[in-house]
Image (tube, grey):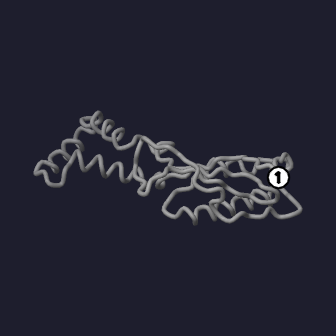
Amino acid sequence: MTVRYFYDIPVYRLPKEQYYRERDKYTDSVLFPEYSPYSQALRENEAADPNCNLAIRDHLQRSYGGCWTFNEIIGYIRLHFLGSQIRGEYFAVQKKRIVRTRTKILEYRTWKLAPEVEMPYPYTSEGIYSAILEYLADCRKELHGRYVDTELFESIGDHVDWVALVKQQ
C-alpha cells in the first residue's frame, strides 16, 4: 500500500494569546523593572507619550522571538491515508525542554502520533473529513501543553473532495 501525504499540520510551543502575553510581560519587565524606584515614573512617561519607547519595544519584541506565526512552531503532523485509515507522522524538535528559540531542527519522531482512525464506509467527503478531525483531536490529547494549529486546514476542509483524494492512493 502506498502512503499518500495530504497535509502538514503545524504544532506550536504554546497558543498565540499566551505567547503574546508572555512577550508583553517580558518587554514590560525590561522597560519598567520592579526593583527600580523609577518604574512608576517611566510608566507615566510612556502613558504621556506612547511613542517614546517604540524603538526599544520593537527591539525587545524581536529579541524575545518576534511574531508568533511560524516562529513558535516546534513540529508538524504529516497527515496521510493508509488504506482506509487516517494517520499522522510526527516531526518535531529533538530537545528535552522546549523553550522559545529561533534555531531549531525538526526531526522525525514517530510514524504514528495517535492511534489511527478508520474512515467510515461507504466513503463520503463529510465522513472522511469528520474522521480526520477526530484524528487531529486525538493528536491534541497526545501533545498536551502544545497548540495544534488546524485553523487553515479547517477553513478548506469542507471544500475538499475527500473521496477523490482518497481514491488517488
Tally of marks? 1
Give me the residue at 51% from left, 52% from top. Answer: 12
From the viewer's side, name the closer residue of 66 and 80.
80
* Furthest residue toward left: 37
Give me the residue at 34% from left, 49% from top. Answer: 24
* Furthest residue toward top: 55
In the rendered view, would you say 108 is above or below 61? below
Give me the residue at 33% from left, 40% from top. Answer: 63
Name the image quarter holding residue 127. Answer: bottom right
In the rendered view, would you say 161 is above or below 145? above
Residue 11 image point, x, y percent: 55, 52
Residue 156 image point, x, y percent: 70, 47
From the viewer's side, name the closer residue of 158 and 107.
107
In the picture, measured across the screen, residue 89 lies left or right of residue 55, that is right
Check disc 1 and report the residue beneath it.
Answer: 1
From the viewer's side, name the closer residue of 160 and 53.
160
- Element at label 1: loop
In the picture, measured across the screen, residue 157 lies left or right of residue 51, that is right
Residue 109 image point, x, y percent: 57, 54
From the viewer's side, name the closer residue of 125 and 98.
98
Give me the residue at 24% from left, 50% from top. Answer: 29
User: Disc 1 residue type?
Assistant: Met
Residue 129 image point, x, y percent: 75, 56
In the picture, measured across the screen, residue 17 lies left or right of residue 39, that is right
Q: How many residues crowd mark 1 within 10 Å: few (<14), some (14–19), many (20+)? A: few
In the picture, measured across the screen, residue 114 lies left or right of residue 66, that is right
* Furthest residue toward right: 122
